[in-house]
Every structure is written in structure tokens, then in C-alpha cells.
Image (cartoon, helix red, strand yellow):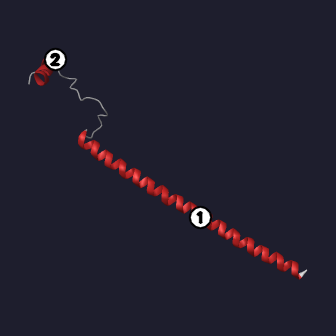
């Protein structure tokens, strides 16, 4: 009976060690994926910032979103004088 308890204790210790390594593996994997996700996200965000800086330099910043600024309150004579006859 003592030998059976000794064998069960050895098996329990081995399974406990195996469980600890399993938990450490899961934590290491999650940490690795977190670091890789942060690196990829940082590169993507940096590229986006560089793109926006170049776009703002060439296109200009502002809330226009592709719309042409227009003077809706001008009459045709004022519009013609201001824009067409330069």
C-alpha cells in the first residue's frame, strides 16, 4: 500500500510539473503574440502617419473631404468678376 501511495505521489508531482510548464507555455505564447501584434500595429500606425503627413503636404488638410469650396452667396456678376476675368 505504501508503494502505491509513493507511485501516485510521483505521478501527481510529474503531472503538476507538466501543468506548470503548460501554463507557462500559454502565457509565453500570449506574450509573444502581444509583442508581435504591437510591433505590426506600430509599423502600420507609423506608415499611416507618414502617409497622412505627405497627403496633407500635397493635398492640404481640412474638413472639405473632396468638395470644392464655393461661394454660394455670390451673384453671377460677382463670380464672373472674381474668377473668370483675371
Check disc 1: other Cα within 10 Å, few if <14, some if 14-19, many if 20+: few
- Depicted 63 relative to depicted 38: above or below: above
- Determine which residue is flagged by label 1: 27
Query: Left or right: where does residue 21 sit relative to residue 82?
Result: right
Residue 12's image quarter? Answer: bottom right
Position of residue 5 measured from the top left corner of the image (x, y, whole percent): 85, 78
Looking at the image, the residue that sits furthest to the top is: 76
- Residue at the location (32% across, 49% down)? 50
Q: Nearer the viewer, mark 2 or mark 1?
A: 1
Front in this rendered view, residue 36 or 59: 36
Q: Quadrant of the C terminus?
A: top left
Q: CA distance from mark 2 to mark 1?
A: 71 Å
Query: Left or right: where does residue 4 sit relative to residue 36?
Result: right
Q: Quadrant of the N terminus?
A: bottom right
- Determine which residue is flagged by label 2: 76
Position of residue 26 measured from the top left corner of the image (x, y, whole percent): 62, 63
Q: Secondary structure at mark 1?
A: helix
Residue 39's image quarter? Answer: bottom left
- Residue at the location (17% across, 19% down)? 75
Position of residue 20 measured from the top left corner of the image (x, y, whole percent): 67, 70
Residue 22's image quarter? Answer: bottom right
Looking at the image, the residue that sits furthest to the right is: 1
Q: Secondary structure at mark 2?
A: helix
Front in this rendered view, residue 74 or 39: 39
Amino acid at each position: 500500500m505504501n508503494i502505491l501511495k509513493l507511485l501516485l505521489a510521483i505521478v501527481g508531482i510529474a503531472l503538476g510539473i507538466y501543468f506548470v510548464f503548460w501554463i507557462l507555455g500559454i502565457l509565453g505564447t500570449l506574450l509573444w503574440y502581444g509583442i508581435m501584434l504591437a510591433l505590426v500595429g506600430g509599423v502600420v500606425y507609423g506608415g499611416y502617419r507618414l502617409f497622412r503627413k505627405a497627403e496633407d503636404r500635397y493635398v492640404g488638410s481640412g474638413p472639405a473631404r473632396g468638395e470644392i469650396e464655393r461661394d454660394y452667396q455670390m451673384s453671377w456678376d460677382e463670380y464672373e468678376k472674381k474668377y473668370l476675368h483675371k
